[in-house]
Amino acid sequence: MPRRLASITLDNLDDLPLACRRCVFWELEPVAKTRAEESGDAALEKEAWVSATLLEWGSCGKTAYVDGIAAGFVLYAPPLYVPRSLAFPTSPVSADAVLLMTAHILPEFVGGGLGRMLVQGVAKDLTRRGVKAIEAFGDLRWERPACVLPADYLLAVGFKTVRPHHRYPRLRLDLKTALSWREDVEVALERLLSSMTPERALRPA
């Protein structure tokens, strides 16, 4: 099956799953997120965030296509562009790192190597731009699909804890490590991505 990776832009933003297209968990601070959801403006806020980030910083996401179908995606940006990152007890993200916000692979495409394809695409993009690492907030009590990535899975794919916390540790992955992931890591990564459902987000405590 033909596969390709494309940067997320305003032209293909609607290729994201509908719930993800309307999710602004990371893009807005908590009060603004609630206001946008209550007013029905979440999709517009998502579009505005992508537009501003593209203009000011550059590529902030990748979508993987299989036979022309959007099969998975990943979003990332410097913490300056991610208001929700400040709500975590283990913030701030390191100055030399970009934040891995969220990611998802449709269940029917799990097992095809898309997880590795997506994250290596991010790693290559950020390496070209002089970024040294990716960081993410993990959830040690992860029980159901949410925007916050399960800490156990992040550890399984090579992330290392840089700031411990009983619930939301901050983890870091050197980009050189991401570019050289072994195939056995791919399986754990895809299980992680297929478990993500951004619209059912856990709120940092």
Image: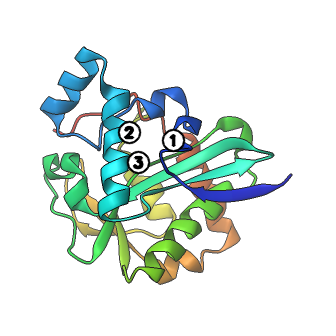
Q: What residue lies at 21% left-to-right and 72% top-to-bottom?
A: 94
The mark closer to the camera, 2 or 3, is 2
The amino acid type, in three-letter code, at marker 1 is Leu
Rendering coords of residue 97 (x, y %): 30, 72
Residue that numbered label 1 is attached to:
13
CA separation, marks 2 and 1? 8 Å
Rendering coords of residue 146 (x, y %): 40, 36
Q: Is residue 78 above or below residue 44?
A: below
Rendering coords of residue 53 (x, y %): 32, 55
The amino acid type, in three-letter code, at marker 3 is Pro
The mark closer to the camera, 1 or 3, is 1
* Residue toward you, 62 or 58: 58
* Residue toward you, 192 or 12: 12
Determine contact: label 2, label 1, CB under 8 Å: yes
- Any part of residue 136 in sight: no
- Is 167 displayed left or right of 125 in the figure? left
Residue that numbered label 2 is attached to:
47
Q: Is residue 173 above or below residue 117?
A: below
CA separation, marks 1 and 3? 25 Å
Residue that numbered label 3 is attached to:
150
User: Which mark is first along the chain, 1 or 2?
Assistant: 1
**Which class describes the residues within 10 Å of circle 3: few (<14), some (14-19), or many (20+)?**
many
The amino acid type, in three-letter code, at marker 2 is Glu
Quarter of the image with the C terminus is top left
**Which class describes the residues within 10 Å of circle 1: few (<14), some (14-19), or many (20+)?**
some
Q: Is residue 130 above or below residue 164?
A: below
Under circle 3, the secondary element is strand
